[in-house]
Amino acid sequence: MGPSLLLAQFLCLLFFHSHSQPAHSSSNFSSSVQLCPGDQSLALLQFKNSFSMMPSSPYGFSCYPPKKVLWKEGTDCCSWDGVTCNMKTGHVIGLDLGCSMLYGTLHSNSTLFSLHHLQKLDLSRNDFNRSVISSSFGQFLHLTHLNLYSSNFAGQVPPEISHLSRLVSLDLSSNSEELMLEPISFNKLAQNLTQLRELHLGGVNMSLVVPSSLMNLSSSLSSLQLWRCGLKGELPDNFSPLSNLQSLDLSGNGGLTGSFPPYNLSNALSYFDLSDTRISIHLEPDSISHLKHVEKMHLERCNFVGSNLGLLGNLTQLTELGLADSQLVGQIPFSFGKLKQLEYLDLGNNNFIGPIPDVFVNQTQLAWLDLSGNSFQGHLPFSLANLKQLSFLLLSANNFTSKILNEFSNLTQLACLDLSNNNHNRLYGQIPPSVFKLEHLRLLMLSSNDKLTGNISSVICELKFLEILDLSNNSFSGFIPQCLGNFSDGLSVLHLGANNLHGNIPSIYSEGNDLSYLNFNGNQLKGVIPPSIINCVNLEFLDLGNNMIDDTFPSFLETLPQLEVVVLRSNKLHGSLKGPTVKDSFSKLQILDLSNNSLSGPLPTEYFNNFKAMMSVDENMDYMRPEDLPTSYVYSVTLAWKGSEIEFSKIQIALATLDFSCNKFTGKIPESLGKLKSLIQLNLSHNSLIDYIQPSLGNLTNLESLDLSSNLLAGRIPPQLVDLIFLQVLNLSYNQLEGPIPQGKQFNTFENGSYEGNLGLCGFPLQVKCNKGGGNNQTSRKKIQCLKRDLDGKQ
């Protein structure tokens, strides 16, 4: 081989190597390429070292697993993960630190802002601890991509962002609720960023920005996300940024009005979400023709005006269609059968009627079908068994009269089967064995069908991936399979309440289980509460009420750190409550119901001192639910509430109640009860409590119901109770109270029944007037008569 040929081959190899490297690369470069300048390498290291590296944070990283920033001093920074350099100059032009566990404050003098050549910057999914977005970001004049998604920034979005005139993509979404974009800054941004193709501001407070300002946005936009921005007012009909849009998300702006679709809607639009707005949806032939390329359409909780849903059947490219909670009526249009590409269909919580038509026969790609919360009736259609890609089948709260289809065994990909009804469905018969062969099943919910019968087969324990099992409020009988205690470490919810089950509670609960909700209420279970429940370290909710459990109080429960609800009412519990043996026992407890048992001894003062969650008022109006599950499942409980038995199908986190009624407790009411300021209901009735009513109960300023009836309480009603301005129910009847009834505020609304059986009380609302000394005249006369009789006896 001649020298000239060797030289030619070498040059070819060199040419190939240089052209095979990308223009911006974090790989090692050949010796002809400039190394990262020392000042930029130092700036990167100082920037990284200004933060803690935390695998979790108070804000919570939104990705898993997070990346680790492992930069080594003394090496070429162009070889570092996340760093991209210009091959000719060595300047750092790209920095991707998305999801890198950065935690701390991003200051305006950070060395990050000395990297003036940056073109792409990604700091998403970190926790910058409510830092203000610095005006120094405006110095990155070469920047084309800026991603600060979900990184806990707060304060005002600086107007200097508008200096970044080369920006093609800007993402500030999913940050702190306090992140705000003012009208002046938004208008500058809209006018100067003329090359923008992606603008994602979801969750940024834009409540002062008028919708007409959106007209100034670049017509080059292909993606616009303004979900939950607080926008209000009318969306302009001539909405120019729509002309080239492929993706539009205005969801969650409850004050946003207008009409959709506008006349200049982009023919390229493939995704739009207008859910939870007040925009009027007009589905008419002329407008629908513009939507022929739409693939994903979400119109949940929207305002449909005289719309013909059948027209949606012409959008044959649809893969997702969400129409839930929109007051739609009639039957499912047969034209929906043409939507053969559908993977997701949500028609839940509308007013659809009649049998489910056979429109799903050809929708073999369907993975999510939600028809819950309607008025469908008749049999479950066999055509559903043909949807072999289904992962989620939600048919709850309808009027079906049917057996559970044995053919559901064809749905081998099924992860969620919800046939629960909330007192509508009338499914009957036994659970077909084929259901237990759905090996991918994670959620099985068959509650409240009333006529589902038979035994719960132990074969159910073959569902190794089950996370929610709810068979409550049916007519199941026989024993609870013992394997349910430990068959699936992933099981989070086990609800078998309100059936006819008997025998013992499953006695073995394996270590490392994920059980958070355990409810066997309303059966005929006997025996004791198994101590192995202490292995359920994630348990938040335990309801074993309304059974025939014969046991002492299960003090071992105090070792469970997450317990929020304990209901043991209406059993045969006996003995005394001895008090805590571990630190911070029951510190998260919100509901404790031990009523209708035979418990005795003094009230557990030491436990009350540990109820920390009841000592501070929680204004969280959300509901108790399992975490990290792909479902809207919420916890439920039945309590004696303000004199009536009430089923709470949803339990608000702020609901706090203590019920020790109908036992054999003795002694005084502990003063420590007055610390439990979040209590809404306190019931100590039908015991043998003595002495006076604690004035400290006047500190329970959230109390709505107080029942101390049928005890041996004496003395006067403390005037401090008048300050309980939310008190709706007061029952002090059948004690030995005396003196005047306090007046004012809520006490002016209570009737005789609140005080009857206390012969020494006087004043409104009773007919007995008080004497000048503040006592009951009739009682005073009785005392004189008794004293005279005693004296006569001594003589």
Image: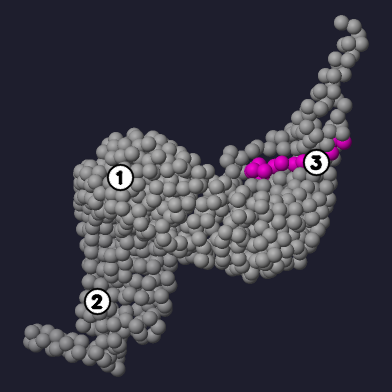
| Left or right for 44, reference 538 | right
Q: Are marks 2 and 1 in contact (CB under 8 Å)?
A: no
Q: Which residues are magenta?
A: 89-104
Q: Residue at x 25, y 49 (%)?
A: 428
| Residue 489, placed above or below residue 155 | above
Where disc 3 sits, the SS reads: strand
Q: Which residue is mark 1?
A: 404
Residue 744 or 471: which is nearer the viewer? 471
Seen from the viewer's position, the closer of residues 31 and 274 is: 274
Quadrant into which the C terminus falls: bottom left
Give the residue at mark 2. Answer: 733
Query: Few, some or many C-alpha atoms within 10 Å of disc 3 (few <14, some 14-19, many ≥20)?
Result: many
Q: Which callout, 1 or 3, points to the residue nearer the camera?
A: 1
Identity of the amino acid at label 1?
A: Ile
Q: Residues within 10 Å of mark 2 (few under 14, many from 20)?
A: many
Q: Does residue 789 lie above or below 647 as drawn?
A: below
Say which of marks 3 and 2 sits in front.
Answer: 3
Q: Position of residue 193 (x, y in %)?
A: 79, 56
Q: Position of residue 227 (x, y in %)?
A: 61, 58
Q: Disc 1 on helix, strand or loop?
A: loop
Mark 1 and mark 3: span between their CA atoms?
60 Å
- Give left or right: position of 512 versus 72: left
The amino acid pointed to by label 3 is Ile
Can residue 520 be found in the magenta stretch? no
CA gap, disc 2 to disc 1? 51 Å
The image shows residue 323, relative to residue 687, as above or below, that is above
Which of 696 and 25 lies nearest the eye of the viewer? 25
User: Could you tell me residue 554's position as x and y percent?
Assistant: 29, 49
Q: Which residue is mark 3?
A: 93
Name the residue rendered at 75%, 41% in the picture: 95
Of circles 2 and 1, the one toward us is 1
Mark 3 vs mark 2, CA separation in Å: 79 Å
